[in-house]
Image (cartoon, grey):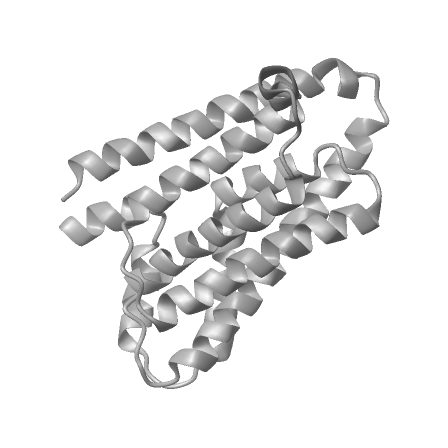
Amino acid sequence: MAFGVAAYAHGVDTSDAGYIAEITGINLLPYVYLGAKHMITGYDHILFLLGVIFFLYKMEHIGIYVSLFAIGHSTTMVLGVYFNWAISSYFIDAIIGLSVVYKALDNIGAFQRWLGFQPNTKAATLIFGLFHGLGLATKVLEYNMSEDGLLPNLIAFNVGVEIGQLLALATILIVMGFWRRTRSFWKFAYSANVAMLCAGFVLFGYQLVGLVVVP
């Protein structure tokens, strides 16, 4: 029962967890699927990605930031699972919630007004990518993956995550492309980031509650 509560809170599908617990050996396609599924359904990752590209127009700039994010989460996801870094998923997900808060504040120029300077956005994207990767690692560890074929399966999961990220990014860019051509974009851009800010605080608060309540 405790596992079921934790799984529900962290988005681990019970059927997926049961399937992974039963199989052994190298199973590349199932892990590619699971990685893509997690990224596409991971609203916290999608919100952060949306915040990152919200005011980016050139594909070269989008490519740089998305690559930094991918490098960050790929590194800690693989290392976290391979070395079994047993970090509380609630704690990591709370930080991921704060990453959404940070990006929303950055987009509305809050740091310039409050601190008088602009934090390095590339460094922040890479650093938060590392935490997002730890969040991915905690999810994979909950699957109780077999040691047999662990590294190839882990790489396959990471490939799936990147595929899911590209699919999510393509969808976001298409929607943003249409929205940016309308007058409502600049009219509601600030409000959209405030909504993102609120969502980040909700995610942060929810995970804090889980950290305190769930044993």
Q: Residue 22 or 176: which is nearer the viewer? A: 176
Where residue 83 sits, quadrant-wise, is bottom left
Relative height, residue 103 to residue 197 (above, below): below
Q: Residue 194 or 113: which is nearer the viewer? A: 113
Q: Position of residue 11 (x, y in %)?
A: 36, 48
170 lies left or right of 31: right
Task: Say if residue 91 shows up in the picture.
Answer: yes
Where residue 194 sits, quadrant-wise, is top right
Q: Position of residue 179 (x, y in %)?
A: 78, 28
Relative height, residue 38 to residue 113 (above, below): below
129 lies left or right of 15: right
Count the numbered circles shown: 0
Q: Residue at x 52, y 69 (%)?
A: 32
Q: Position of residue 206 (x, y in %)?
A: 32, 31
Q: Residue at x 67, y 48 (%)?
A: 169
Q: Position of residue 90 (x, y in %)?
A: 30, 43
Task: Say if residue 36 shows up in the picture.
Answer: no
211 lies left or right of 193: left
Q: Residue at x 75, y 13 (%)?
A: 187
Q: Residue at x 86, y 27 (%)?
A: 181
Q: Could you tell me which quadrant the C terminus lies in?
A: top left
